[in-house]
Image (cartoon, helix red, strand yellow):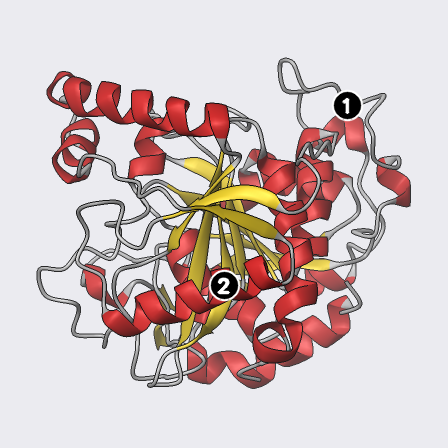
Amino acid sequence: MTVTVAEALGRIARLDPALSAFTEVWPDAAQQGGTPPDRTADGGPPLPGVPLSGSTGPPFSEMPLSGAPFAVKGPAGIRGYAARRLRAAGAVPVGSTAVPGPGTHWQTWGLGAHGPTRNPWRPDRTPGGSSAGSAVAVATGMVPLATGSDGAGSVRIPAAWCGVLGLRTTAGLLPSPDRTGLASAGVLAADAAGAQAYLRSVTGRYEPSLPEFPVPAVWSSDLGFAEVDDEVERVARRAVERMAAAGLVRLDATSYALLDPCDAWLAVRGGQPDLATAVRAENDHRLASLFARTPLLLTPVTPNRPHGHEGPGERYSTSLTWAFNLSGHPAASIPAGFDPDGCPVGLQIVAAHGQDASLVELARAAELIMKRRVWSASPR
């Protein structure tokens, strides 16, 4: 993380009028806030079961977040637990990013200070959401790191469509205001090092436990029910094949399917969780059986490409993501390549509960493999 606060503010001033990633920018506070705040006063209470001492990572004062700019999702993001922990690690908040606002048609996926939030690769397309502005800010280098939250894919989808890394953490790992239990805190980062620093600062530890490479993995293009665009499937599948060829993963030849979680997710979100019991129980059983024998599940992040600001019609961009909000598993989106329209495609990696750090380690290894083709590309 080499971007300074001054550089971040300069990039925001230059780029944001066209992209509308931010709702507010705090230049005065950011430029005066380079000194890490008092951790006891501002860091918040420790999480149950997550000690803030004796961690495997370096002390907070020695972490690379010191002086690094970051953005927070939405108007309440600065008060969130993750933001407080990042500030305790010395990171500097520079502004709040766009989410769908009052009166905003949901399909724009973000309303910033300059209008609808725009995909930096194709301004006529949505960046995804709801962590829309966070993804755009990271993709364009305005900040190296931004907070997000993910209740149906709200970190993973914009990460996929903007070509950055997005991690949705295990349900319950971090505090969440979502009483349904669907939403978990997450991060959007320019690379795996940023996600690693995030996890270390917000949890106080970083303990990946992947087996030796190649890691056994199962690939599913559609989870058994989604209608996936051919080009999206092709790009994601090629990324998996490159990972396998490089010795990063070893694919299990078996197919894999879940029950379509659409009605169950809508029932839980609508306050009728009893209507989701049967689907959740069956999918939980299938996922537990999978992760008992295989550490990783790989899928495309979305079934579709980034759509225009008029919306996708009746298609759910969440078809391949929201099953894991119901189950609580950690899931990440990493850049897989580009579709024929020049828009990024994301590869989703899902792991067993608590294996957040392992997902970041896999993303780090994938960066090294795909860097020349994917990670080095930039809309800046």
Measured along the vertical axis of the image, is residue 103 above or below residue 8? above
Write down the quadrant of residue 68 in the picture. bottom right
Residue 174 in the image, given as x and y percentages of width and height? 55, 28
Q: Nearer the viewer, residue 97 or 236?
A: 236
Residue 94 in the image, given as x and y percentages of width and height? 64, 61
Report the residue marked by disc 1: 52
Report the residue marked by disc 2: 241
Residue 232 in the image, given as x and y percentages of width and height? 32, 69
Q: Nearer the viewer, residue 220 or 14?
A: 220
| Dot 1 amino acid type | Leu
Which quarter of the image is occupied by the N terminus?
bottom right
How far apart are the alpha carbons under marks 2 and 1? 39 Å
Write down the quadrant of residue 211 in the picture. top right
Residue 333 in the image, given as x and y percentages of width and height? 48, 55
| Dot 2 amino acid type | Glu
Callout 1: SS: loop
Write down the quadrant of residue 142 in the picture. bottom right
Let me know if residue 144 appears in the view. Answer: no
Using residue 205 as the reference point, say whether residue 35 is left or right of it.
Answer: right
